[in-house]
């Protein structure tokens, strides 16, 4: 009997072996939208742990897979993961999987700054995109404002203009901050009198993405975008509510709290964002002058969304910010004024702005948008023996209509922008008021699957400055799935005002108003060309390369020249400012590791001066690298940035330097604690040269070319009171 049972068992096993033999599993992983292969995508058999990585054709081959039912996981960074059950048989036909990109993925994001409804990879205009995950990473490093997000982008410099107030401006490719247009949700809310305070007063936690366009971009939104534009896009309410609290503390006695909440119920949605920041006066150099001013700032930004039907939405928002900064002589700040300790500088500013947007899909391919914003900015600057106070009103109203078909997209529209500044408490106020009316049209056409052309034209009219005709054109060539190239160019302009970096460094003391009879608007043209390549090494390591070449020329550049009587007068330069160079960006990805490398060559020359000198405080050579390890449980990042030598206004050469940072974060369902070591080698200007020159009672503040605060250690936590529903990835 035992022999019979043994025989039956062996027979059954042989039958099972016959029907459950091992086979080689083959599959192809494609991108759903384009059917392009997803190089580096992975397939994992949950039960056996066997897996494979897609090669350059998207193919995956895994040997020794038993036939029968298997639970598998198909995934790729930035795409929606596919968890399915497959019945594996002897059939040699490869399985085909199509992955949809996640909402926050680079390729699926609609870039709003270009006024197009296309995804970023199908837009001829070169756009640099910073997504939700990277914004979260930078918010951990600096939760008070967005300066770090921009500072660590290739070819962008955050130039500190004041040691006492911490004012900083954004320079794209070496050009002054006034040539960059800052937008939030497509609204020009910043600039003018707020100047270097703008980027210091924008907290990052409610932002969903950054879109950066470099080069003359005035065709898109009007004057001011000679160097480029930065559009910050806010989060919107989703069906699943979001509640996030970020608390941060630094060893320099800086404390920051950010709270964001959003929810949508049927036709009503809302977001609520609040931020508070306190910084104690900080002097790491021990020279009795603040390197970080004492700062108290608060920001509140509620928004209400209404969705009357599936084709329309209306949202309104209001933003309020209060900022109080006190810097200068520490002894005076703590103990009061004396014969030696006399200098201090206080900036108190208030910003209130409203936004309203109505959008309606009036027919299948027709989309109407009407929007308006009103912004009020009030600032009081008081320093020893000087004061400068004023209030600025800005309004922006636009209506546009977009339409098209599968091959061609159009958008046409018109807007009106007003800017009114009134100086307070002055016998000779430097008031200024400008109104600009503009009309524009933009077209994007697919001539083939490989060739896309974008062209646009804007005409702006300002009663005091004349008519500005602003064409632009960009061409995208998608040679293969792995290689593409863009070339483009356009014209730009900037209406003069007194709020330049040079005037700000003087605290506007003895700066004469703009003479509209003898000053012309600044004008520019810009060209750029870039190539992109992506590939894989050994079927596991993926990489991408972007190489950019650019040129921007500015005519009638606004200069501030000294007069014999001690005043300063604005004039147009007799010659151009020329910025030309290149940027290189390389990214490697291997499983949970990512390695970013960048280099920028910036040759910005002042061609209105003899021998065309390099623009002061502009390093020709800049490089950086970031190494990230990130999975569902951990985020660890190391970064290093090199800044080459610069020249001061007197021609003196500065030292080059390297700053390094380290971030460690652990993810839990309830939130993510973190620690960050920013500039842990403590590179700061005082190690190379003095920031302040005597006499102590009437100090001379030298030009700033390196970090002034040095090493900053911070620790904090991102709390998710309702649990963590997902972790985004690059």
Image (cartoon, helix red, strand yellow):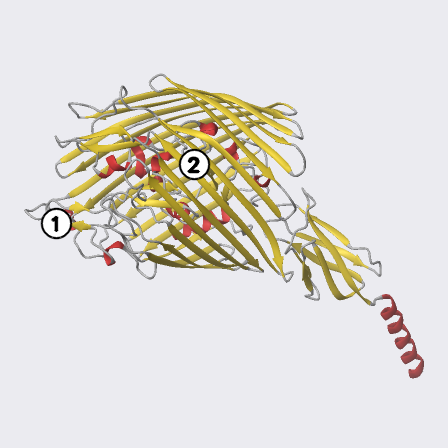
According to the picture, the residue beneath numbered tag 1 turns out to be 694
Q: Bin the neighbour count of mark 2 within 10 Å (Cα to Cα): few under 14, some 14-19, many 20 and up.
A: many
Question: x%, y% of residue 248?
Answer: 36, 52
According to the picture, the residue beneath numbered tag 2 turns out to be 228
Question: x%, y% of residue 594?
Answer: 52, 57
Res. 678 in view? no
User: Viewer-proximal residue, 128 or 424?
Assistant: 128
Q: Is residue 80 above or below residue 662?
A: above
Q: Is residue 59 above or below residue 214?
A: below
**Residue extending furthest front?**
611
Relative side of 335 to 602, left or right: left
In the picture, residue 516 is in which quadrant?
A: top left
Residue at 56 percent across and 42 percent down: it is: 240
In the picture, residue 610 is in which quadrant?
A: top left
User: Viewer-proximal residue, 133 or 174?
Assistant: 174
Relative side of 509 to 706, left or right: left
**Residue extending furthest left?**
339
Residue at 17 percent across and 55 percent down: it is: 287
User: Viewer-proximal residue, 151 or 75?
Assistant: 151
Residue at 44 percent across and 52 percent down: it is: 599
Which label sits on residue 88? none
Q: Bin the neighbour count of mark 1 within 10 Å (Cα to Cα): few under 14, some 14-19, many 20 and up.
A: few
Question: x%, y% of residue 534?
Answer: 59, 51
Relative side of 414 to 699, left or right: right
Image quarter of the N terminus: bottom right
Question: x%, y% of residue 191?
Answer: 34, 33
């Amino acid at each position: 009997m035992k022999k019979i049972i043994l025989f039956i068992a062996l027979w059954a096993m042989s039958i099972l072996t016959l029907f459950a033999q091992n086979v080689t599993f083959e599959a192809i992983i494609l991108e759903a939208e384009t059917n392009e292969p997803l190089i580096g995508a992975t397939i994992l058999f949950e039960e056996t742990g066997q897996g494979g990585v897609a090669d350059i054709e998207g193919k995956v081959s895994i040997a020794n897979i038993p036939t029968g039912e298997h639970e598998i996981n198909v995934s790729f960074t930035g795409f929606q993961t596919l968890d399915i059950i497959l019945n594996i048989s002897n059939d040699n036909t490869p399985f085909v999987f199509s992955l949809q990109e996640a909402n926050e993925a680079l390729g699926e994001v609609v870039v709003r700054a270009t006024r197009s409804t296309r995804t970023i990879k199908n837009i001829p205009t070169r756009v640099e995109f910073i997504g939700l995950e990277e914004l979260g990473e930078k918010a951990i490093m600096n939760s008070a404002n967005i300066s770090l997000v921009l500072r660590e982008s290739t070819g962008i410099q955050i130039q500190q203009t004041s040691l006492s107030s911490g004012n900083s401006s954004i320079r794209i490719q070496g050009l002054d901050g006034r040539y960059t247009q800052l937008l939030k949700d497509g609204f020009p809310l910043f600039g003018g009198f707020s100047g270097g305070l703008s980027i210091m007063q924008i907290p990052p936690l409610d932002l969903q993405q950054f879109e950066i366009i470099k080069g003359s971009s005035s065709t898109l939104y009007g004057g001011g975008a000679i160097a480029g534009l930065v559009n910050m896009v806010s989060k919107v309410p989703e069906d699943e509510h979001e509640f996030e609290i970020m608390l941060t503390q630094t060893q320099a006695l800086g404390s920051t709290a950010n709270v964001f909440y959003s929810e949508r119920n049927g036709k009503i949605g809302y977001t609520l964002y609040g931020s508070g920041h306190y910084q104690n006066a900080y002097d790491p150099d021990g020279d009795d002058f603040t390197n970080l001013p004492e700062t108290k700032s608060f920001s509140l930004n509620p928004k209400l969304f209404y969705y009357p039907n599936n084709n329309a939405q209306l949202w309104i928002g209001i933003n309020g910010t209060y900022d109080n900064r006190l810097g200068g002589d520490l002894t005076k700040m703590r103990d009061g004024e004396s014969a030696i300790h006399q200098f201090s500088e206080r900036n108190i500013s208030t910003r209130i702005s409203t936004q309203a947007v109505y959008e309606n899909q009036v027919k299948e391919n027709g989309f109407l948008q009407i929007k308006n914003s009103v912004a009020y900015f009030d600032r009081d600057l008081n320093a020893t023996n000087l004061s400068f106070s004023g209030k600025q009103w800005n309004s922006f109203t636009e209506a546009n209509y977009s339409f098209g078909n599968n091959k061609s997209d159009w958008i046409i529209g018109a807007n009106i922008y007003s800017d009114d500044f009134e100086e307070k408490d002055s016998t000779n106020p430097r008031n200024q008021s400008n109104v600009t009316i503009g009309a524009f049209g933009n077209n994007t056409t697919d001539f083939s699957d490989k060739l896309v052309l974008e062209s646009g034209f804007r005409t702006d009219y300002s009663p005091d400055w004349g008519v500005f005709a602003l064409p632009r054109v960009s061409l995208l060539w998608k040679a293969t799935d792995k290689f593409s190239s863009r070339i483009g160019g356009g014209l730009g302009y900037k209406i003069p005002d007194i709020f330049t970096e040079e005037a700000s460094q003087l605290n506007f003391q003895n700066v004469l108003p703009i003479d509209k009879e003898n000053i012309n608007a600044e004008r520019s043209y810009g060209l750029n060309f870039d190539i992109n390549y992506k590939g894989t090494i050994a079927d596991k390591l993926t990489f991408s390369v972007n190489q950019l070449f650019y040129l921007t020329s500015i005519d009638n550049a606004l200069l501030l020249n000294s007069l014999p009587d001690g005043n300063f007068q604005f004039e147009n330069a007799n010659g151009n400012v020329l910025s030309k160079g290149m940027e290189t960006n390389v990214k490697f990805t291997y499983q949970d590791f990512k390695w970013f490398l960048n280099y920028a060559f910036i040759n910005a020359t002042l061609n209105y001066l003899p021998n065309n000198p390099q623009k002061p405080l502009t390093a020709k050579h800049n490089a950086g690298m970031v190494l990230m390890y990130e999975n569902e449980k951990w985020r660890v990042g190391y970064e290093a940035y090199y800044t080459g030598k610069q020249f001061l206004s007197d021609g003196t050469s500065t030292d080059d330097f390297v700053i390094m940072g380290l971030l460690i974060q652990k993810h839990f369902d309830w939130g993510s604690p973190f620690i960050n070591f920013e500039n842990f080698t403590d590179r700061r200007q005082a190690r190379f040269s003095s920031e302040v020159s005597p006499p102590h009672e009437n100090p001379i503040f030298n030009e700033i070319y390196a970090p002034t605060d040095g090493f900053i250690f911070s620790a904090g936590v991102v709390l998710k009171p309702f649990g963590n529903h997902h972790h985004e990835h690059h």
